[in-house]
Image: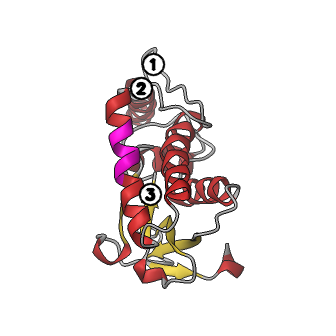
């Protein structure tokens, strides 16, 4: 009986220690999701480089036909990813945050939550030159399934797109070509979104 109590106390202490150790100490990300860079570890120049880099990769998808739309997507994807990290009260790394969601300590923050929210936000831009897709890897695997937004030029194949993944780096947007990413992405039909 005493061993059971000691184990229970140890588990509760461990959970409290993990939770307090992962709580941001006095710093939160403040984001104006309309026009400005997230107010956290990125300075203005670094933020601008990220926007320019993502805009460049997006522009390649549609042969530089709509740079203004590529710019809007880049800003929105970067800003909204940082905003969601704040909204989810993110615990890093992302896998640990997943554990907290599954245990009921956090409401949102699994990869499909990030995908739903970022997809909704990017849809609101009413894109003309680009098309949004839902990408899934290892579909059906309890521990390995991963979801993310994939963006392509309008009417181009899913495999020619770019993965926009805010979950992977805990709110700092990651992007890569579908073909070169480490995940074996497949398109989820729109009827299953």
Say whether disc 3 or disc 1 marks the residue closer to the N-terminus. Answer: 1
User: Is 179 above or below relative to 121?
Assistant: below
**Extent of the magenta region:** 48-53
Residue linked to disc 1: 27
Quarter occupied by residue 13: top left
Number of disc labels: 3
Q: Is residue 42 visible?
A: no
User: Is 107 above or below relative to 6?
Assistant: below
How many residues crowd around disc 3 within 10 Å: few (fewer than 14), some, or many (20 or more)?
Answer: many
Residue at screen point 67% across, 60% down: 123
In front of the other: 30 or 191: 30
Q: Position of residue 99 (x, y in %)?
A: 47, 48
Q: Position of residue 128 (x, y in %)?
A: 64, 68
Q: CA distance from mark 2 to mark 1?
A: 8 Å
| Residue 40, numbered label | 2
Q: Is residue 4 visible?
A: yes
Residue at screen point 45% across, 70% down: 145
Say whether disc 2 or disc 3 marks the residue closer to the N-terminus. Answer: 2
Residue at screen point 44% across, 33% down: 15
In front of the other: 36 or 24: 36
Q: Position of residue 100 (x, y in %)?
A: 51, 43
What secondary structure is found at the residue carrying circle 1?
A: loop
User: Is 53 above or below relative to 32?
Assistant: below
What secondary structure is found at the residue carrying circle 3?
A: strand
Q: Residue furthest top?
A: 26
**Circles 2 and 1: CB atoms closer than 8 Å:** yes
What secondary structure is found at the residue carrying circle 2?
A: loop
Residue linked to disc 3: 165
- The answer to if 165 sits in the magenta stretch is no
């Amino acid at each position: 009986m005493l061993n059971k109590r000691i184990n229970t106390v140890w588990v509760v202490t461990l959970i409290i220690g993990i939770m307090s150790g992962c709580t941001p100490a006095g710093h939160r990300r403040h984001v104006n999701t309309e026009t400005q860079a997230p107010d956290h570890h990125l300075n203005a120049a670094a933020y601008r480089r990220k926007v320019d880099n993502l805009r460049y990769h997006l522009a390649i998808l549609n042969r530089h036909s709509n740079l203004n739309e590529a710019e809007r997507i880049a800003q929105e994807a970067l800003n909204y990813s940082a905003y969601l990290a704040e909204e989810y009260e993110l615990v890093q790394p992302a896998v640990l945050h997943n554990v907290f969601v599954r245990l009921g300590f956090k409401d949102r923050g699994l990869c499909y939550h990030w995908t739903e929210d970022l997809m909704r936000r990017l849809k609101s831009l009413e894109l003309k030159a680009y098309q949004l897709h839902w990408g899934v890897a290892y579909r059906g695997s309890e521990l390995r399934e991963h979801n993310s937004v994939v963006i392509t030029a309008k009417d181009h194949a899913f495999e020619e797109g770019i993965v926009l993944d805010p979950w992977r780096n805990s709110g700092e947007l990651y992007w890569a070509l579908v073909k070169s990413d480490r995940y074996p992405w497949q398109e989820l039909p729109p009827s299953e979104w």
